[in-house]
Image (tube, helix red, strand yellow):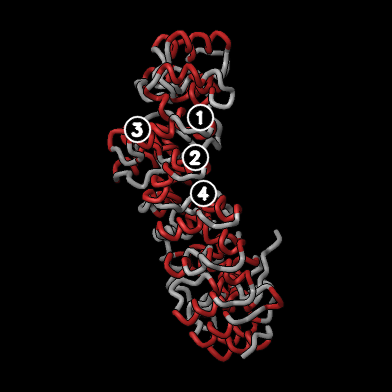
Amino acid sequence: MVAFHASALDGVARNPALPTPLLLRLLAFEGDGYGPPRQAVQRAGLPEEAVALILAHPVRNARTHLAMSTGADPEQRARLVDDPSPKVRAALAFGSEDHTPRTTVQPLADAVCARLLDDPDAFVREALLDSPHLAPSFTTALATHHDPAARLRAVRDWEALAQGDRSALAADPDPDVRRAAALWACRHDAHLTAELLHDPQAAPEALRHGLLRRADAERCLAERTHLAALAENPSLPADLVERLAVDPDEDVRLAVSVRPELDEARRMAIDFTVGDLARGDVAWVRDGRADPDVLRRAATSAHPLLRRAVARSPHLPPDLLRTLVRVEDPVVEAHLGIHHPDPSEEVLMRVYARLGGTFSAWMAETHPRFRREGLAARYADHPDGHFRRLAVRDPAATPALIESLSHDPTVRTRQEAARDPRLPLPRLREALAVPELASSAGANPALPEAEMTAVLDRAGVPA
């Protein structure tokens, strides 16, 4: 395995004990045109003098990192709205690229977004409309915007739109806006659904969600047109559902098997196959993730996709959480480790043990519920370095053990030990000079200020 090596400067940039004078010195660094390390710019709780330095920084990268920071307040980021670089303004418009479930990104104020939407650079306007971080109050106001791309973005929040805005979008002069609006409106309009079935771009979605006339459903079934989409349609007559339940196409049968109106006996009588890694993207479970009845139906079902879908809900009560844990489905456990605030330590440990090196394992390991006590005694001498690394997490681990693990054959175990404040100072100083440990050692909060200063000096950061 190739380990990621970063510099001691990168580590110091994210060190929680970095004194403000050194932070300001680091933020002023031009870094041969690359600017200061991203970790310094995107620290949470930057003081005003640090923000001012970044806003006026001559290197565009520094301002771009602030524009996309999850650690900065929206008001701090908004001060880049008049930045001379369209790339910085586009970064501000899109916002953070961190979409992990435990990360909350506060949206920019509506007035700031409105200015970005009027930006002279099309790239900035496009970045804003692509952003996943816009407030509903802003997106619904786009329904009457002069730009059809903005009105198209408003359609995505159809359920929050006023009826007058919906009617206007349905009659919009732009064909893409009209189509997008029609795909929402057709859920309650069989005539509109029938029209959309003649549009190749719209037909699959209209079949999936639109209110269907029986004749249209039968024609699609006879022509075998988008049958997997048709099998999801909530208005499909019951006898046609039964026909699709025995369709020769296994994707069609699987789509039928997760329909919400089926009772458990009928659902499990369908001949379907679920892949070992299928994530469980079931719309009615996703949309009802806070509905107690939906949660109970899905969690107590024998259908793997329903259990996997409901495992993504952070609202599962303790009894349903225990029900899902007993299933011992690796995908269910991975979802619980990512999305639920209170999974058991055993579930998190199984995810970590089974999926080491993956995003799911990282989410499990960084979960507040991940076990800490007893890990040193259990894993310090484990034959797998992936587990020896866990010993560092134990509050009872001694400085001698941390130092021993900083020499471990597995690089990630050495890195974990190098960032631990219990590491004896002589070994911490040594680690700063070891390429694969330098970044971890630089981030160690026990690193003396004099050593941090020396790191900046050696990197050529002006005093």
In the image shown, does 253 or 354 lie closer to the viewer? 253
Which residue appears at 58% of the width and 64% of the height?
88
**Rounded to the nearest whole Å, what is the CA distance between mark 3 and mark 2?**
39 Å
Rendered-image quadrant of the N terminus? bottom right
From the image, tell me which residue sits under label 1. 179
| Disc with the residue nearer the chain's start (4 vs 3) | 4
The earlier-in-sequence mark between 1 and 3 is: 1
Q: Is residue 357 above or below residue 281?
A: below
Residue flagged by tag 2: what amino acid is it? Leu
**Do callouts 4 and 2 mark residues in contact (Cβ within 8 Å)?**
yes
Amino acid at dot 1: Arg
Q: Earlier in the sequence, mark 1 or mark 2?
A: 2
Q: Which residue is mark 3?
A: 300
User: Pointer 4: residues within 10 angstroms few (<14), some, or many (20+)?
Assistant: many
On the image, the x and y values in percent for residue 224 come to: 57, 13
Circles 1 and 4: CB atoms closer than 8 Å = no
Q: Position of residue 182 (x, y in %)?
A: 45, 28
Check disc 2 and report the residue beneath it.
Answer: 152
Task: Using the rendered image of the protein, determine whether residue 401 is visible from the camera's viewpoint.
Answer: no
Tell us which disc is closer to us: 4 or 3: 4
Q: Residue at x 47, y 24 (%)?
A: 208
Instruction: Please tell me how crowded label 3 is: few (under 14), some (14-19), or many (20+) other residues with Cα within 10 Å.
Output: some
User: Which amino acid, by three-letter code, is at mark 3?
Assistant: Thr
What distance separates the C-alpha of mark 1 from that of mark 2? 9 Å
